[in-house]
Image (cartoon, rainbow, N blue to C red):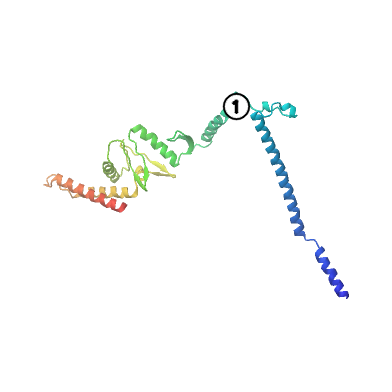
Amino acid sequence: GRQAAGGRRGDSDVFQRSNKGVHARNQRDEEELETMSKKQRAKAALERKAALYDKLQRGEIEDPEKHGFLVNFERKGPAEDTAAAVSAKPVSGQEHSFEDKLLEHPDMAEITDEFGRTRVVHRRSQEYAEHLERERGGGHGVKRQREETEGQAQWPVSSGHNRDECGDWAGKHHKEGKGMLDFGGHEEPVVVNGRVKSRWDVTLSNQEKEYLKEIAEETEANRAAAPGPSGKKDPKADRRELLRKKAEARKRLKQQGK
């Protein structure tokens, strides 16, 4: 009988014991509920203030002094000239920030893109290279642009030259080691991702380079195989043979593109 009574007392002690984890969790829950109630009260106060401002804006409250307000709501807005001055400050600050960037970082440059936007970019960036190319292109009267269409580089030329003439001219000068020259007669290097590349590498795609290289090699081979001045070979026939080979090379290039 004593053992049974002791066992019952032990069971009652188990249920009366406190659990530290449960106690801490209950305390955290109470703190969170108190914090949420504070946030809800603050939110309700802000909503009441917003509703009061709306009523004053619409003129529903004729005499605010009768309601015992401690704030003169009619004087909360600045004057028009002050508002204009405040709105003009960020623009001047922005200009000073551009100047500070240029002074602190000599590698940075201020450019104006084709949309008229002024930005500060790195001198080795692609955007700065395109800006320089636009500046030089406007001075020569020959405008070359790179348009990406279906992964192939298109070369629109506004100087009256067609695509084949530009390709023959570029292949000839590239074979002679002059690089991709412009129509003004000088080469302008372009900086792309921190590396200096010629206009040949920037403007043309891999297939176009291969096509022009093949034409240049065939031209050199025909020139080496041509007889001297005393030979009787017909120059017109040589020209027709060269045009035929160019047409075949162009046809193979189109088939590879498909």
- Location of residue 2 with respect to 192 vertically, above or below: below
Using residue 15 as the reference point, say whether residue 239 is left or right of it.
Answer: left
Q: Is residue 228 visible?
A: no
Q: Residue at x 52, y 32 (%)?
A: 99
In the figure, is residue 9 to the left or right of 238?
A: right
- Total tally of numbered discs in the picture: 1
Q: Position of residue 213 (x, y in %)?
A: 28, 49
Residue 76 placement, left or right of 117? right
The correct choice, above or below, for 117 with respect to 198 in the image is above
Q: Quadrant of the N terminus?
A: bottom right
Residue at (36% x, 35% y) in the render: 137
What residue is shown at x 41% (from left), y 42% (from top)?
191
Can you give x and y, in whole percent of width and height, for residue 75 in the image?
67, 26
Instruction: Tell me what residue is drawn at x 30 percent, y 53 percent.
Output: 256
Label 1: which residue? 83
The answer to whether one can see residue 38 in this image is: yes
Q: Secondary structure at mark 1?
A: helix
Q: Quadrant of residue 179?
A: top left
The 10 Å Cα crowd at callout 1, few under 14, some 14 to 19, many 20 or more, is: few
Q: Residue furthest bottom?
A: 1
Q: Nearer the viewer, residue 213 or 10?
A: 10
Report the front residue among 67 and 85.
Answer: 67
Name the one closer to the observer, 38 or 228.
Answer: 38
Kindly identify the amino acid type of the residue bearing the numbered disc 1.
Ala
Asked where in the image residue 14 lies, by quadrant, the reply is bottom right
Q: Position of residue 148 (x, y in %)?
A: 37, 45
Residue 211 spot, x, y in % from top left: 29, 49
